[in-house]
Amino acid sequence: MATNAFSRTIYSKIRPLLSASIESRNILVCSYHEKVIDHYENPRNVGSFDKSDTSVGTGLVGAPACGDVMKLQIKVDENGKIIDAKFKTFGCGSAIASSSLATEWIKGKSINEAGTIKNQDIAKELCLPPVKLHCSMLAEDAIKAAIHDYNNKKTNKKKE
């Protein structure tokens, strides 16, 4: 008897989901913040630069646990200012949004300023839930990797 009452209670809670359209169920089950949706539907700075260009730094990072892969590139002027940034990301909406936001934030900054961007800042701006924090970590790592690549190219150019 108690099991039957418990089943009715559970059914009454999920009945709205069962009768809702697929689109409504997706929204109810997995809702992204509007900022994530905006960057996912309208990603900024998608593309790539020639990675052999000495003014371009390329960061390629991935998260084996979820399969997200992020390539972020920066184009730096002779004064060390990031004049442009591009990304290509294979992953979930949060990974794409994190990449898109990161490229917006680093454009116009010096290399040192861009290196201070933290994943917590990206996660806070996009209102990422704890389960998606690895996406903002990837974006931070991609920025750092691109800066490292650019600095290596600059150092190698000076040696020549």
Image (spheres, helix red, strand yellow):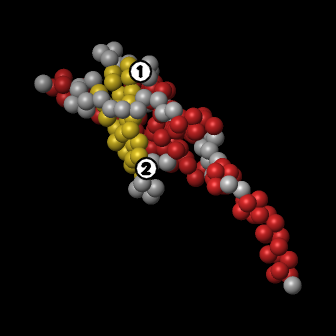
Q: Amino acid at mark 2?
A: Asp
Residue 129, image x, y percentages? 62, 47
Discs 1, 2 touching: Cβ within 8 Å: no
Q: Position of residue 121 (x, y in %)?
A: 56, 35
Tell me if I can see residue 148 in this picture: no
Q: Which residue is mark 2?
A: 68
Secondary structure of residue under mark 2: strand
Residue kind at label 1, given as amino acid type: Ser
In the picture as drawn, the residue positioned furthest to the bottom comes out as: 1
Q: Residue at x 41, y 21 (%)?
A: 110
The relative height of residue 28 versus residue 145 in the rendered view (above or below) is below
Q: CA distance from mark 1 to mark 2?
A: 27 Å
Q: Quadrant of residue 37?
A: top right
What residue sits 48% from the left and 41% below the top? Answer: 96
Horizontal arrangement in the rendering, residue 6 relative to residue 145 (left or right) = right
Quick one: label 1, few (<14), some, or many (20+) residues within 10 Å?
some
User: Exactly how many numbered labels are in the figure?
Assistant: 2
Residue at the disc numbered 1? 110
| 115 and 138: which is toward the camera | 138
Task: Describe residue 69's horizontal placement relative to residue 129 as left or right.
Answer: left
The residue that appears at 38% across and 23% down in the rendered structure is 84
